[in-house]
Amino acid sequence: MRLPRSAQLLLLAGLALPCALPAAAAAPPADRSGQAERGLASVIPAAQLTGVDPRANSVFSSTLPKGATARVTNTRNNRSTIVLVQDRIPAPRPGHVLAVSQRVADLLGMPRNGVATVKVAPLAVPQPDGTVRLGTGTGLAGRRAFVPAPPHGR
């Protein structure tokens, strides 16, 4: 979409109001319910893992919030691993629930094309109020836990 000339000039001058531009498609809100889901997982190319160790059990999720932990199971071979959500996928492809590091792909035995159907069972899902909701992967789904701050001096 092309902006009108007046909007282009305002942008160049740094005077554009946030409402002057069309809104980009926002990612859906994070799912903090702790419910399991199924979908596709794909491997993140190492070049795109800025600031994330490719050898870590890291994933990017289309639904879970940053900081959540989950048990991910490859439905084809039943191999599973525990992962940490590093961030959200800003614009996931339809049906994709995770983008995984190469290490996670190896642990799950994902095929060479780097795409597999997975079950994602959240273990701990951070809530906006500072508590943690226990997910279906724990067997204690729906309960809340409070994580205290570490004592001062440590």
Image (cartoon, helix red, strand yellow):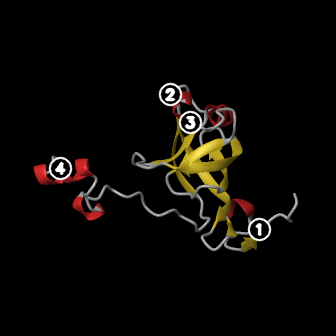
Q: Does residue 49 appear in this view?
A: yes
Tell me whether the residue at label 4 lies in contact with that at label 3, contact meaning CB atoms closer than 8 angstroms.
no
Tell me if 53 is positioned left or right of 100 in this view: right
Q: Earlier in the sequence, mark 4 or mark 2?
A: 4
Labelled disc at residue 113: 2
The residue at which mark 4 appears reads as 9
Question: 10 Å neighbourhood of mark 4: few (<14), some, or many (≥20)?
Answer: few
The image quadrant of residue 52 is: top right
Vertical position of residue 148 compared to residue 69: above or below: below
* Along the viewing direction, whichever of 52 and 30 lies nearer the viewer: 52
| Amino acid at circle 2 | Asn
Q: Nearer the viewer, mark 4 or mark 1?
A: 4
Q: Earlier in the sequence, mark 2 or mark 3?
A: 3
Tell me if 10 is positioned left or right of 146 in this view: left
Tell me whether the residue at label 4 lies in contact with that at label 1, contact meaning CB atoms closer than 8 angstroms.
no
How far apart in space, not on screen, are marks 1 and 2 (Cα)?
A: 39 Å
Labelled disc at residue 50: 3
Number of labelled discs?
A: 4
Residue 17: x percent and y percent?
27, 62
Q: Earlier in the sequence, mark 1 or mark 2?
A: 2
Q: Nearer the viewer, mark 1 or mark 2?
A: 1
How far apart in space, not on screen, are marks 3 and 1 (Cα)?
A: 28 Å
- SS under mark 2: loop
Residue 44: x percent and y percent?
53, 35
How far apart in space, not on screen, are marks 4 and 3 (Cα)?
A: 34 Å
Question: 10 Å neighbourhood of mark 2: few (<14), some, or many (≥20)?
Answer: few
How far apart in space, not on screen, are marks 4 and 1 (Cα)?
A: 50 Å
Q: Residue at x 61, y 52 (%)?
A: 120
The image quadrant of residue 152 is: bottom right
- SS under mark 4: helix
Residue 15: x percent and y percent?
26, 57
